[in-house]
Image: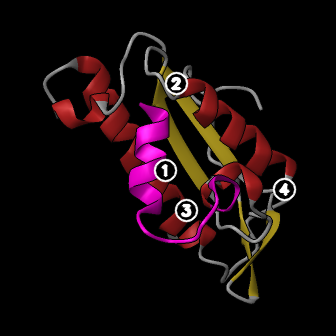
Amino acid sequence: MTIQFGEWLKGNTAYTNEELSPINHDFSDLAPLYLQGGGKEVLIDMIRDFAHLTHKQNVDVTLDVWEHMTHDFQAHGASPPDSAEALKRMKAAIMHYTGPKNTGHKDTGPKSKVHKSAGHKTKHTPLPPCERTQTL
């Protein structure tokens, strides 16, 4: 199935698998990255590999994994508890990185990281981990 998705992605272009794979790119200037995955989804190992790669490139990356969930479990909405928790965590991540403490206008304290994005430096604090956060 992965091969078929790759063929669909490439279409009639001259791109190679290596050019299209996110594992083969430099993300060192990427803004903070928040990832979620289901422990039962087929792509979880690739998601973990991507998280480790970006972490090694000094990207502020957080990966939360719901061990008993499948791919796109967040799409179930607020009814299942795990989906509701994932959506709340996603909102918290967005608010954390776009709130006044992380907009780059003020020093956020000794735990701040300097991040270069779009040609300028901003300071932010890492997203606080939760019980589902994977160690990178």
Residue 97 is tagged as 3
Q: Nearer the viewer, mark 4 or mark 3?
A: 4
Q: Earlier in the sequence, mark 1 or mark 4?
A: 4
How would you classify the magenta stretch by its main secondary structure?
helix
* Other residues around mark 2 within 10 Å, as few (<14) / some (14–19) / many (≥20): many
Say if 69 sits above or below 119 in the image: above
**Residue 47, image x, y percentages:** 59, 35
Q: CA distance from mark 1 to mark 3?
A: 6 Å
**Circle 1/circle 3 CB separation < 8 Å:** yes
Query: For the point 76% across and 73% down, which residue is it?
Result: 107
- Image-quadrant location for residue 57: bottom right
Q: Which residues are magenta?
A: 1-19
The residue at the far top in this view is: 68
Q: CA distance from mark 4 to mark 3?
A: 17 Å
Q: Amino acid at mark 4?
A: Asn
State left or right for residue 80 relative to residue 115: left
Q: Earlier in the sequence, mark 2 or mark 1?
A: 2
Q: Earlier in the sequence, mark 4 or mark 3?
A: 4
Question: SS class of the residue under badge 2?
Answer: strand
In the foreground, 81 or 73 = 73
Q: Amino acid at mark 2?
A: Val
Q: Which residue is mark 4?
A: 58
Q: CA distance from mark 2 to mark 3?
A: 20 Å
State left or right for residue 104 relative to residue 85: right
Question: SS class of the residue under badge 1?
Answer: helix
Q: Nearer the viewer, mark 1 or mark 4?
A: 4
**Circle 2/circle 3 CB separation < 8 Å:** no
Q: Which residue is mark 2?
A: 65
